[in-house]
Image (cartoon, helix red, strand yellow):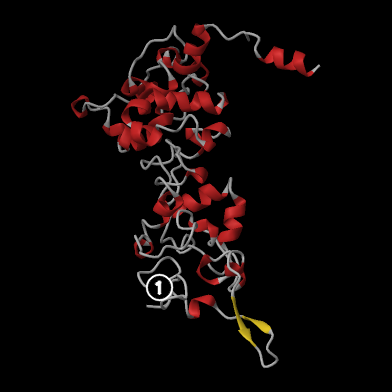
Amino acid sequence: MLAVACAAIKDSKPIMPIRQYELMLVGRVDAEYVGTDNCVAKCHRHDKIADDFKHSVHGEQIKPETGLPLVNCESCHGAGSLAIANLEDDPELNDAQKKKCDTTTFLDIMNLPPQAQSLICLKCHSAASTPSLTHWNASAHAMNDVGCFDCHKLHQGPQQKVSRDEMSALCYGCHPDVKAENQLFSHHPLREKKMACVDCHEPHGSLQEKLLKGMTPKETCTRCHMEKQGPFVYEHGDVMENCANCHTPHGSVVNNLLSAAMPFLCFQCHGGHTLDNTAGAKQLFVNRCTDCHSQVHGSDISFPAGAGNGTLRQ
């Protein structure tokens, strides 16, 4: 039974004709491109949207002298001639009396799958934004049905992307666990608006897990914590490439975002020190390890000769 099921995976599956994919990206092929000004001149319901667009990053690209791909309303919504074909161009009618353009002839963007929605943007951005979109197709967001429109709102003002102050609220919509962690006692200053999610994460894709920036977790963290970067003569064992071995980046109940309180955090790898009590028995010496080993991220000095390597207070 399993062999039959596996064999079915290799069978050819019917795909839509190429023309159907074209319609999914460009809309009605029997319509003509008339330009944004002609569309707005007949349908004033979109004046506010058109004005915001003119003052946006995309609106600046309408100028041919920029050398960038020309972007206007029809770049995303498809050709607009059919939408305004039956509108009356009567200057005596006020805006309330005029009919609205036939939006059913436009590309039905909001009902497309997220991947198809993103393809509309990638028609231009795959060339114009290659460095940040190199890993998009295999990113965690793209693989989980997150599209460009989930984060970028092209009709909500000229900015067309979420501000740093609003970014955490946007990300929390899909990551409520991170929101809960950020409410804990020790946290990165997202709540204080001193940081944003994109300071550590690359939402369009990354070579690292969790969409982290940089080549390693340590490289991500040391962008801000440069004093922990090293190199040091005495490194902290095998934990130097991943700060998350000891820290929980989004929030913790322990100081310094530690994943557990000392000395219990250190005991996960180290046996600790023992002392001889009055009866001659070995007794575990328990205290905060950093009272003596303050340079836990690395040090240039060691224990006294013969006592082994360590990271003592300098």
Tell me: residue 250, above or below residue 107.
Answer: below
**Residue 43 image position (x, y, % from top left):** 41, 24
Looking at the image, the residue that sits furthest to the front is: 306
Q: Amino acid at mark 1?
A: Ser
**Residue 269 image position (x, y, % from top left):** 58, 64
Query: Is residue 208 something one can see in this rendering?
Result: yes
Q: Quadrant of residue 161?
A: top left
User: Residue visible at 44% across and 37% down?
Assistant: 204
Q: As drawn, is 98 to the left or to the right of 131? A: right
**Residue 104 image position (x, y, % from top left):** 53, 18
Answer few, some or many: residues within 10 Å of disc 1's Cα (few below 14, many 20 plus, some between 14 and 19).
Answer: some
Q: Quadrant of residue 153?
A: top left
User: Residue visible at 41% across and 16% down?
Assistant: 80
Q: As drawn, is 288 to the left or to the right of 83? A: right
User: In front here: 101 or 174?
Assistant: 174
Query: Is residue 253 something one can see in this rendering?
Result: no
User: Residue visible at 37% across and 43% down?
Assistant: 159
Tell me: residue 261, above or below residue 277.
Answer: above
User: Residue visible at 49% across and 57% down?
Assistant: 238
**Residue 118 image position (x, y, % from top left):** 47, 28
Secondary structure under the numbered disc 1 in the rendered image:
loop
Tell me: residue 138, above or below residue 306.
Answer: above
User: In front here: 309 or 48?
Assistant: 309
User: Which residue is the site of mark 1?
Assistant: 302
Q: Quadrant of residue 154?
A: top left
